[in-house]
Structures are given as structure tokens and as C-alpha cells.
Amino acid sequence: MIANGCAQQPGPLSKSAEVCIGGVSTRLIATAYANRIFVVVSQRENLGTLISATRESATGLASGPGCYSTRVLLGRRDDEALEVYARTLVELINKSRPADLLLALNLLDSSRATFHEVMRALDAIKVW
């Protein structure tokens, strides 16, 4: 593609949506980079808590179920539900392709119903 006489390189695949979850407008963004998937789920005007989720490599094992680790990089460290989102999402991603996850999560409610609605909404915009 050429614009203004310069060739443009295609960027990372990105999809977004705005959905109503639990009666609250929720912004979803998923972007696939070469080695990582970046996902934003926010019901406020900022990114909220940033969580890294990675698949741990088991020495001597080429495939099979993996172990995943999560780490809060920035934000709330007192809510384990946030790490449940990251771990569940990184497992789903790794069923399709090997990639780490960087998740920005800012939700008003951490109920089970909200969790299921978020996962359904992310499935609709998945880039993995």
C-alpha cells in the first residue's frame, strides 16, 4: 500500500468493540504482535491493572498442557480475580498459537457473570 509516495508496512492485527457488560459500557481491544497478545478490557477511561501472563516451558516436553504464570506489572495486587482473567485468557490463546499475554483490565464488577460475559465478548474479537 502506498500513501503520500511512501510504502506503508502493515501493522499488527487489531480488533476492538464496545459492548454492554453488566449494564456498563465496556471497551475491548485485542492486538496481536509477533510474540504477544495485548488485550484491553475497560469500563472506565483508563487501562487499569496491567498483568503479564506467560506459558512456562517445561524442559524435555515438546507439547502438552503447560504451566502458566501471571504477574501484576502495574495496578491492583489485592484482587486475585484479575489474575484469573489473565490465566484463563492466556490458556485460551495458547490453544490457538503460542503467545504471551499482556492484559489491561479495569472492571467495576468482578462477579462470575461478568467474567463469562467478558470472555464471550473477547471471543468475538479474538486475534489469536
Image: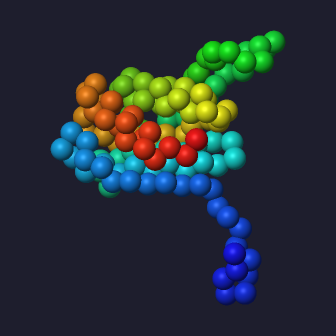
Describe residue 12's horizontal placement relative to residue 122 as left or right: right
**Please, is residue 81 above or below residue 16 in the view?**
above
Residue 96, how many percent across, how many down?
61, 33
**Is residue 66 or residue 48 the one in the foreground?**
66
Question: Which residue is drawn at the image coordinates 60% and 48% (left, top)?
Answer: 32
Residue 58 found in image quarter: top right
Residue 51, how many percent across, how many down?
50, 35
**Please, is residue 29 above or below residue 55 in the view?**
below
Residue 68, how many percent across, how many down?
59, 21
**Is residue 128 or residue 35 the one in the foreground?**
128
User: Where's the N terminus, which quadrant?
Assistant: bottom right
**Please, is residue 82 above or below residue 64 in the view?**
below
**Please, is residue 43 above or below residue 120 in the view?**
below
From this viewpoint, which residue is outermost toward the right?
A: 60
Residue 38 found in image quarter: top right
User: Where's the C terminus, which quadrant?
Assistant: top right
Residue 60, how many percent across, how many down?
81, 12
From this viewpoint, which residue is outermost toward the bottom?
A: 4
Question: Which residue is drawn at the image coordinates 64% and 49% (left, top)?
Answer: 33
Task: Determine if residue 31 is in view.
Answer: yes
Describe residue 17's horizontal placement relative to residue 24 as left or right: right
Question: Which residue is drawn at the image coordinates 42% and 29% (left, top)?
Answer: 85
Question: Which residue is drawn at the image coordinates 64% and 61% (left, top)?
Answer: 11
